[in-house]
Image (tube, rainbow, N blue to C red):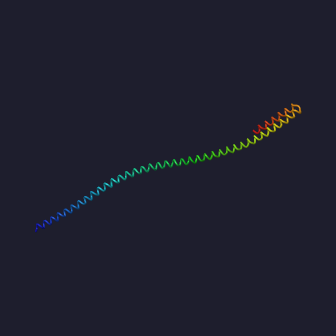
Amino acid sequence: QTLMLELTRQQSSFMEDIDLRSANLDKEKQQVEQEDRIRELEAQKARLAEDLQRRTSELRAVQSEKDSLQRQVEQHQADKITIEQQLDEMAEEVDSVLRSLEEAENVAETQAEQILSLQEQLETQQLETSSRNHDDSETPNVSRLERAEETVRLQADKIL
């Protein structure tokens, strides 16, 4: 019976030892799993840090390109305003030239009318002089004709 008790006690002790070892193994297993998980998380953290750094660099490059494009847009807008101002100035100059040409055309028409009128007067005077030449002596009439022609020429020069 003592042997039985001893065996039971040893069995109990052995079972406690097995339970304790099993608990220790479970703890070690958990610790190993936690260490593995920590390593996985650290590796993931390193990958995420690299990815973050790469994306940050890409964002900086995109921002730099955006800034460059913005400067170009601003320059194009300034150029557009300058060109519009130049076009407005040119349009004003063209309008001014057109007005001047219109005035010159009006003056030319008036002068042409005056020259035609003077030519008609000259022809009339020549006809009158010619008919008088037949009636009177020729010398005074020729000088009158020359004076009339000279007067018409002077008036035409003044008009021009």
Residue sitting at 49 percent across and 48 percent down? Answer: 69
Residue sitting farthest toward the right: 136
Residue sitting at 19 percent across and 62 percent down? Answer: 18
Which quadrant is the N terminus positioned in? Answer: bottom left
Q: Quadrant of residue 33?
A: bottom left
Instruction: Please provide percent x and percent y for residue 8.
Output: 14, 66
Which quadrant is the C terminus positioned in? Answer: top right
Q: Is residue 29 above or below residue 106?
A: below
Residue sitting at 42 percent across and 49 percent down? Answer: 58
Q: Quadrant of residue 159?
A: top right
Instruction: Please provide percent x and percent y for residue 56.
Output: 41, 51
Q: Is residue 56 left or right of residue 20?
A: right
Q: Is residue 146 above or below residue 23?
A: above
Instruction: Please provide percent x and percent y for residue 3.
Output: 11, 66
Residue sitting farthest toward the bottom: 1
Q: Is residue 105 left or right of residue 31?
A: right
User: Who is closer to the viewer here, 113 or 22?
Assistant: 113
Instruction: Please provide percent x and percent y for residue 64.
Output: 46, 48
Residue sitting at 15 percent across and 64 percent down? Answer: 11
